[in-house]
Amino acid sequence: MPSIAELLFDAERRQIHIPDFQRPWVWNKNQVRDLFTSLYRRYPVGAMVFWPNRINGDQRHSLIDGRQRLTALYNVIRGQRPWWMRETPSEFAQPLRFNVVDEEFGYLSDKRADDARWVNVSDAFVVTDFLECFDSAAASLASDGRVSHAAVVERIARLRDITQTHINKEVLPENLDTDRAVEVFEILNRAGTKVREADLVVARLSLVWPEVRESLDKALGRWEESGFRVPTEAVLRCLSAVVADTVHYEGLYGSQGDRESPPTEGELVAGFYQLVDATDAVLTMLRGRLGLSRTRPTVLNRGYVPVVYAAQRHAAGELLQVELEAMIGWWQLSNLHNHWSSDVRNRLEDAITALRNGNGVAQLVGLLGKPGRSLALEPIDFRTKRKPSGAEYRLLLTMTKRCGAMDLPSGESLSFDHIGEQVELEAHHIFPTAYLTKQSGVREEEIDQLANIAFITKKKNLKIGPKSPTEYLGELADESLENLRSQWIPTDRALWRPGAYSKFLEQRSRLLAEQANDFLRGLLGEEAWEAAKNR
């Protein structure tokens, strides 16, 4: 078991690594006081749990449990803020003091700071000749009869001996997987911060590349400002793919594939900036090809990792531009077929392996969907309940912006982001919900189907209001049938009548499926589309 002095020495030498996923400083002054009271009285103060990591032959220990205690010990015994804290907490503003008469710890107001009974605890450890400096105060206390000089000396010595107290050190297995380390952390810190596997990966990377968290946060923040929320895990998997041609985290800190040694700091930094450039290129393509909003954040799933890997290979001259552009269609198709709902890591690895082996998008579509079943969309795909987070809903919004849809009733193009108030696109029920609920023969599950949704600007939606389809669609048709056709709304007036709602859904879902497949063909290219359609 190491002594407190040894733990602090290792912390100063940065042999103890403080993962930034852990809770920041959350203790109050009373908890610091109670810790030193327990140490002075030789009470147990609990074990510290470490996770050993070997980096380029050097072993360091990541502190999994015990950060608050180590921080308090470092601040008081060293008399300064620990290196792993960016700011000085208010709890550190007042020095912890020790009453040599009553043998108590506490904090004094400025008015009582000169009370000779109270010793600045940090001074007792930091000042080399502290006993000599305190000797006159000890003599004064002894002359008052409050405590003997020998007792004061003995109590100061006992206080300073706190650094020789041994702390039980629990060490996790060195080969422990990150997911198991996450489990251990959460068991030990159930009331604390929820830790993710990605947090532990960043913690391990920071042993080699100390600025990894800062670099990640900067990139993620910039993408967020541009309207994209990119998962940290996805970025780390991209980094592993770039530096080691695998999405497994072991590629970041172990020998993987053709590598005989872990990536160096220089390789990690270079790989990170390659993936940042590749991600910038991919996000630009996503916005351009799919018409993603600049005002509403787009949350990306981990399926975009192969697209970034492809962009990095394109930048390195290993992938044609046409194949890179087709990867946008592949990603769209993968979302439509719910490819990332399970077994994500292995599915990402399959895609990375295929790209690394020189396969094009025509081969990658073979990874999607059920074997032998066409990936082309069918009318039934638009007969599902409207769900804004659903891939089909997002595809309909994309089609509205990229396939020539016009606003109703103005006929203004919806292919760009409008400027002004109430110009954001919103879902509009072609057959209004309030209208349908009053009609007999309409099943509840039909009312909110995607085939009954069109996108128009909010101000136009407000003007249409609760009019019946026969009334307002008739008015729109009299002005321009092309406006209706641009939104794939059947122009047969007989289908706008109340009793024809089911047939209206059938007809519109067919029109939507046809347009969706044409759009996907344009994204993928003929070869990849034929491979996706004819399986």
Image (cartoon, rainbow, N blue to C red):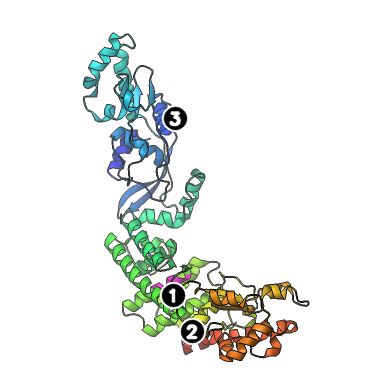
User: Vertically, is 165 above or below 89?
Assistant: above
User: Vertically, is 485 above or below 165?
Assistant: below
Q: Is the magenta stretch mostly helix, strand or loop?
A: helix
Split into 4 quadrants, where in the image is the C terminus?
Answer: bottom right
Magenta span covers which residues?
303-308
Q: Mark 2 points at which residue?
A: 413
Q: Is residue 125 magenta?
A: no
Split into 4 quadrants, where in the image is the N terminus?
Answer: top left
Residue type pointed to by label 2 = Ser
Dot 1: element: loop
**Contact between labelled residues 3 and 2, with CB atoms less than 8 Å apart:** no
Task: Using the image, tell me which numbered label, if any, was put on residue 503.
Answer: none
Residue 336 in view in this figure? no
Mark positioned earlier in the residue sequence (2 or 3): 3
Tell me where residue 395 appears, x and y as whole percent: 53, 78
Q: Mark 3 points at which residue?
A: 44
Depth-wise, is mark 1 or mark 2 nearer the camera? 1
Residue 73 in view in this figure? yes
Dot 2: element: loop
Task: Using the image, tell me which numbered label, if any, was put on residue 419.
Answer: 1
Q: Specify few, some or many for label 2: CA neighbours under 10 Å numbering under 14, 14-19, or 20 or more.
A: some
Determine the image quadrant of residue 378.
Answer: bottom right
Depth-wise, is mark 3 or mark 1 nearer the camera? 1
Tell me where residue 241 appears, x and y as whole percent: 39, 68
User: Vertically, is 266 above or below 326?
Assistant: above
Q: Residue sitting at 34 percent across and 61 percent down? A: 218
Residue type pointed to by label 1 = Ile
Q: Residue sitting at 32 percent across and 49 percent down? A: 59
